[in-house]
Amino acid sequence: MNPIVEMDADALSGAIHARQVSCREVMLAYLAHIERFNPSVNALVSLRPSDELLAEADACDQQLDAGQSRGWMHGMPQAIKDLAATAGLRTTMGSPLFGEQVPQHDAISVARVRESGAIIIGKTNVPEFGLGSQTYNSVFGTTTNAYDPTLIAGGSSGGAAVALALRMLPVADGSDMMGSLRNPAAFNNVFGFRPSQGRVPHGPGLEVFVQQLATEGPMGRSVTDVARLLSIQAGYDARVPLSLTQDPQIFTESLTRDFSDVRIGWLGDYNGYLPMDDGVLSLCETALEDFTALGCMVEACQPDFSMERLWQTWLVHRHWLVQGSLGALYADPQKRDLLKPEAQWEIEGGLRLTAADVYQASVSRSEWYRALSELFERYDFLLLPTAQVFPFDEQTPWPRLVGGQTMDTYHRWMEVVIGPTLAGLPSMNVPVGFNASGLPMGLQIIGPAQADRAVLQLAFAHEQLTQWVKRRPPACLQAI
């Protein structure tokens, strides 16, 4: 395997700026690697012509020759999640309704990685409109798992996670409403970080106050890479009034920290509330020993809140927001027929809501935040499994049965991720090992509101201890 694609993103940035490798050499290495590995997993889509990309790489080299660098990502290949607008490059959102859409502007997070010197090579595949944790759509097809291409990648940042795991990208962006940065990271043995609400400005969009569940964020093969990308994505933008003003350069500082006597609460399966497939909970419980080895005190705990109430709160918010964004498409009968059934179900649920329903759900969401805040008076961090199942057959849209229980919606099998989302808290997937079939799993490290750097520090300490990402996908091992 080419040593260039072996490097993590921070090392690659250092090699580019030290002129140990040229931007052209980097682009050639990645394009060859993508040509070799992408056909088997379908992670990258809308790839740009190689001659255009090499011309941009040459321009990056010329800038370095003149003593100029645009930033940490200077000359690094980057593919953008296909939900985020990319100026001049097709952005389909996985929907045939937008199969040929070419935006005239970049999303805020995309503009920031461009400004940092990234060369946009294409997009990463997503489920239709990002709905569901299985990355398939009628425009590009299905993205499959890096560790077993017969299984799902997770989603909705499935293309990003798989591209990272197979070293087709040095670092990746994603977005997360219902675990979309976290569960594909767990399913592909990489890191995915959902930042605090407002940390990464989402947009620009028509609505800037109500949409508080989805956020963009970073993914990487190392915690350092995740932190460095977050330092580029984060920061206040006047077009997004709820975005945070804290200087994002804090994420470039050392992540080393002593965790002696840090208190951690283990949420597990919420006292048996969440059904889980065999092996998920036991693997995560074994990983608790890693945190003890770091000096942390770990004990089981539970929030003082009904988890079924939390699910109903989630359904109202999800219906409301999806209906708000996709309702106009549903109103047109011809366009409605091109929406997948799960999207139609969400919209129809939103149409049945009253203003009182939405207000009460917001009250419940607020009480959930307060319940977690009470836990954080006793604990510095909380831990929770990232998923309730291991990756399953890629031809299955969603599992109907988990842990012996019937799933009543297309996304009930990912209920484990809704807590941090509804509370607006930072939550990071860290890999915690593999089951007997060689399939990866992860844990969520959850921090108090706006404690993003602290979550990254704990994830970094865990990474140094365990080094799970070094266990490569079988395809990469065969390539060495």
Image (cartoon, rainbow, N blue to C red):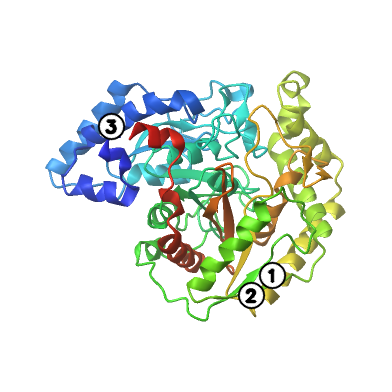
Q: CA distance from mark 3 to mark 1?
A: 46 Å
- Who's the residue at 79% across and 53% down the image? 311
Which element type, helix, strand or loop, lies under badge 1? helix
Q: CA distance from mark 3 to mark 2?
A: 46 Å
Which element type, helix, strand or loop, lies under badge 3? helix
- Who's the residue at 70% across and 30% down the image? 396
Q: Quick one: label 3 or label 1, which is nearer the N terminus?
A: 3
Residue tagged 2: 376
In this view, 170 is above or below 41 = below
Which element type, helix, strand or loop, lies under badge 2? helix
Nearest to the observer: residue 217 or residue 34: 34
**What is the number of the mark on residue 372?**
1
- Kind of residue indicated by mark 3: Ala
Residue tagged 3: 29
The image shows residue 84 at horizontal and vertical percentages of: 52, 38
Nearest to the observer: residue 200 or residue 22: 22
